[in-house]
Amino acid sequence: MPLILGLESSCDDSAAALVSSDRQILAQAVVGQNDAHRPFGGVVPEIAARAHVEILPGLIRRVLDDAKLSLDAVDAIAATAGPGLIGGVMVALLAGKGLALAAGKPLIAVNHLEGHALSPRLADPDLDFPYLLLLVSGGHCQLLEVRGVGDYRRLATTIDDAVGEAFDKSAKLLGLPYPGGPAIEELARHGDSQAVPLPRPLAGSNEPHFSFAGLKSAVQRAVASNRHRPEDVAASFQQAVIDCLVDRTAVALESSTAPSLVVAGGVAANQAIRSALAALAQRHGRRFSVPPAWLCTDNAAMIAWAGAERFAAGMTDGLDAPARARWPLDEAAEKVRGAGAKA
Ligand code: KG4
Ligand code: ZN
């Protein structure tokens, strides 16, 4: 059974994992840098890149030791090659190239978004192609038809902020620590989701795309008014996001015959969002799949798994594979205002 070593360093998590083609996670390790970035309220690219240089090699050592294996037992090295913060991307990609070169193993340059997109298949052996994917992370909010490995059609994207970005910016306005998603989810548990009137940008429109900038501005006004409890703002914000995600995904479900609805990416760790999308899938007669929360936020098991899927399809890369700051899954999709910079 092919065994893949996966490496990830495209944002603020350094990670390594060993995953086999029959979905066994032999070992995995993630080290986040939240404490280093917290004083700045967001990820500082230079700090992140330097931290990856210090942390990632030790994690590679650790997963090999945990699995009691040497590099000889590995069949291919999969490393994230983008999109992301380019200084960070280069760390895992170059580490992967060095290992591939030294051990004489093939390199697989993985698109981080493909890691998220295929991660549900690592957790759910019965999830077949095609499926409709809602990909919600710190840099993205997209609806994609996943037709096969390397075969994606983008149905919708955000015209301004990504959904994780909306969580992080709203959390900052509420004085909550970075990353904002988990902090808002926790605070929202104690609040009233109907207390603060907030907009649902684009809800009810026939156009497929997402928008979150107006929602963030409304949160800003609500906080500045001093008329609302923070927990009510958090709960109302989270409910507005859920309503937008459900409304836009319902539009995509109308135009897709894919039998399954899948949600992945860091924001898919949110329990309320998971429940709302499960209910939506049920209303539309679709199967629903979502990876466990740890597999939604950045990790290397999803990179190793995407590597395993690509390896099985004969897709390996040369040692000259580029590091890419921008790398859309669907290269043919039309550019959308605001979404271009983040793919
Ligand atoms: O996929 P990810 O780990 O990194 C990127 O590729 O961007 O996603 C990170 C994003 C952050 O914006 C974070 O606030 C958000 O996912 N996030 C959440 C939750 N956990 C992480 N958002 C809402 N609720 C959560 N529980
Ligand atoms: Zn990610």
Image (cartoon, rainbow, N blue to C red):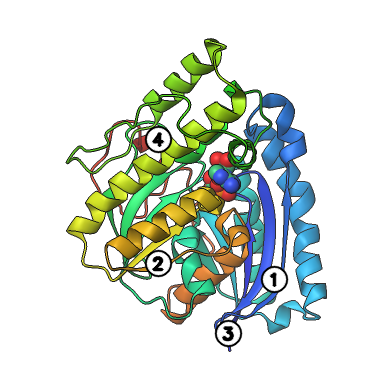
Q: Nearer the viewer, residue 211 or 334?
A: 211
Cα–Cα span, label 4 and label 3: 36 Å
- Label 3 CA crowd tier, 10 Å (few <14, some 14–19, many 20+): some
First-in-chain label (4 vs 2): 2
First-in-chain label (3 vs 1): 3
First-in-chain label (4 vs 3): 3
Q: Nearer the viewer, residue 16 or 239?
A: 239
Residue at x 49%, y 34% (from the top left corner): 193
Q: Nearer the viewer, residue 24 or 236?
A: 236
Residue 266 image offset from top left, x and y in percent: 54, 50
Cα–Cα span, label 3 and label 2: 28 Å
Residue 177 image offset from top left, x and y in percent: 69, 31
First-in-chain label (1 vs 2): 1
Which amino acid, mark 2?
Answer: Phe
Give the numbered dot on residue 341.
Answer: 4
Mark in front: 3 vs 1: 3
- Label 1 CA crowd tier, 10 Å (few <14, some 14–19, many 20+): few
Hey, which residue is sitting farthest top in the picture?
225
Cα–Cα span, label 4 and label 2: 30 Å
Which amino acid, mark 1?
Answer: Ala
Q: Contact, CB < 8 Å: mark 4 with mark 3?
A: no
Residue that label 2 marks:
288
Residue that label 3 marks:
2
Location of residue 78 (image quadrant) = bottom right
**Residue 226 falls left or right of residue 207:** right
First-in-chain label (3 vs 2): 3
